[in-house]
């Protein structure tokens, strides 16, 4: 199995089981050890490669332990500290990593809850672990550009020099991407003022600030939607792939699905929901076959861009969000969700819907 396939398989496991894993020990067994073994390729049962509960006395701190130390050629190369999967990672959780980093030969440290992996090195000062990670891998939303960098940490392809040489760029590019994403979701006053000053010549008063806050948010979402659509069109055109053309039949077409009124506004939440459903459906079919159409009443996710093959519907236009799933007779059941991540709770139903058509 290829590296990317192994990573995708573990990501699927994390999506399906993360909410059921409540303790740090369960997180280690379910997610951390499989990552070390199947993704990085180290033998978790060989103490010459992976040392659990690694101990090194640090100053007045005696007997403190780091969850795992990965050893190569008799030297500790990677330190790993694990926390429970349901908890958010905080830099305070890395206190042992900070201390151990200074007294071992390790140049790489990882803090994880099994879902998110934060990798650190010593860019700011030699032998002192940085306060900010140079690479962040979220198994629920894998950034494909990071996969080659993760592979450099594996037993088969370990290349410390290459990792360190690209770490600074990865650190700042990753931080910038996360900040840009945050601004797209909820633009700050500085972001609003920056763009307003380039299109509006008047004074930036409180009234102008309030007016342009909503305009910048709307323009950002529309720009993102158009960029995604342009990339899909380019990819389809470059590969010569075209959406299948269905033969004309007497079966009635659901006109609601074809309503492309100009008042329709595709939101960032709908696109994020679409990407989650697409990630789940890709376990059954190629990703190019999963498409979307937005309408006034709901956001439809389809197989082969065919409105007769609905996979799911996102009803995100009201305060209470719903995920619509359809049975064999196309009868829809709406499932209330409080956050977009809850779509993962219906992963099997989504895959079953795809299997019916595929």
Image (cartoon, grey):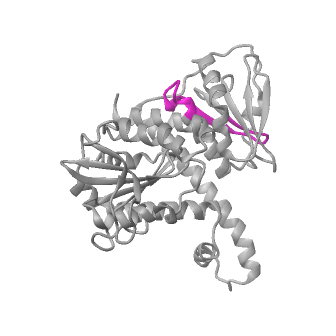
Task: Give how far across and how far down residue 324 sits, in percent.
Answer: 75, 33
The image shows residue 165 at horizontal and vertical percentages of 25, 61
Q: Is residue 301 magenta?
A: no
Q: Is residue 358 visible?
A: yes
Residue 157 at x, y = what percent? 24, 43
Q: Quadrant of the C terminus?
A: top right
Is 341 on the left or on the right of 114, as rendered? Answer: right
Residue 185's place in the image compared with 43, above or below, is below
Q: Residue at x 64, y 44 (%)?
A: 341
Q: Residue at x 42, y 37 (%)?
A: 34
Q: Inspect this view and state whether residue 306 appears.
A: no
Q: Extreme bottom residue here?
A: 203
Q: Which residues are magenta?
A: 280-300
Magenta stretch encompasses residue 282: yes
Instruction: Between residue 76 and residue 111, name the one nearer to us.
Output: 76
Residue at the image position 40 percent from the left and 61 percent from the top: 97
């Amino acid at each position: 199995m290829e590296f990317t396939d192994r990573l995708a398989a573990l990501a699927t496991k994390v999506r399906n089981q993360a909410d059921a894993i409540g303790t740090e020990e369960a997180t280690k067994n379910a997610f951390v050890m499989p990552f070390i073994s199947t993704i990085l390729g180290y033998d978790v049962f060989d103490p010459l490669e992976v040392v659990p509960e690694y101990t090194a006395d640090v100053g007045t701190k005696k007997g403190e332990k780091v969850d795992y130390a990965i050893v190569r050629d008799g030297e500790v190369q990677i330190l790993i500290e694990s926390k429970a999967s349901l908890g958010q990672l905080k830099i305070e959780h890395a206190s042992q990593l900070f201390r151990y980093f200074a007294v071992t030969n390790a140049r790489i440290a990882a803090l994880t809850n099994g879902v998110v992996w934060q990798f650190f090195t010593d860019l700011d000062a030699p032998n002192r672990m940085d306060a900010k990670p140079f690479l962040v891998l979220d198994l629920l939303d894998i950034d494909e550009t990071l996969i080659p960098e993760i592979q450099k940490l594996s037993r088969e392809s370990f290349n410390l020099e290459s990792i360190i040489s690209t770490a600074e760029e990865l650190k700042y590019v990753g931080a910038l991407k996360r900040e840009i994403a945050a601004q797209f979701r909820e633009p700050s006053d500085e972001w609003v003022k920056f763009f307003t000053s380039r299109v509006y010549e008047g004074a930036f008063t409180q009234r102008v600030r309030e007016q342009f806050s909503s305009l910048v948010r709307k323009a950002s979402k529309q720009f993102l939607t158009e960029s995604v659509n342009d990339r899909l069109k380019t990819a389809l055109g470059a590969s010569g792939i075209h959406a299948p053309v269905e033969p004309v039949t007497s079966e009635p077409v659901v006109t609601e699905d074809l309503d492309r009124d100009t008042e329709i506004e595709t939101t960032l939440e709908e696109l994020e929901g679409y990407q989650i459903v697409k990630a789940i459906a890709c376990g059954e079919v190629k990703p190019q076959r999963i498409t979307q159409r937005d309408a006034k009443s709901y956001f439809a996710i389809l197989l082969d861009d065919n409105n007769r093959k609905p996979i799911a519907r996102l009803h995100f236009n009201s305060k209470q969000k719903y995920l619509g799933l359809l049975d064999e007779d196309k009868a829809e059941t709406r499932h209330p969700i409080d956050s977009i991540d809850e779509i993962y709770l219906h992963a099997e139903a989504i895959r079953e819907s795809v299997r019916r058509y595929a």
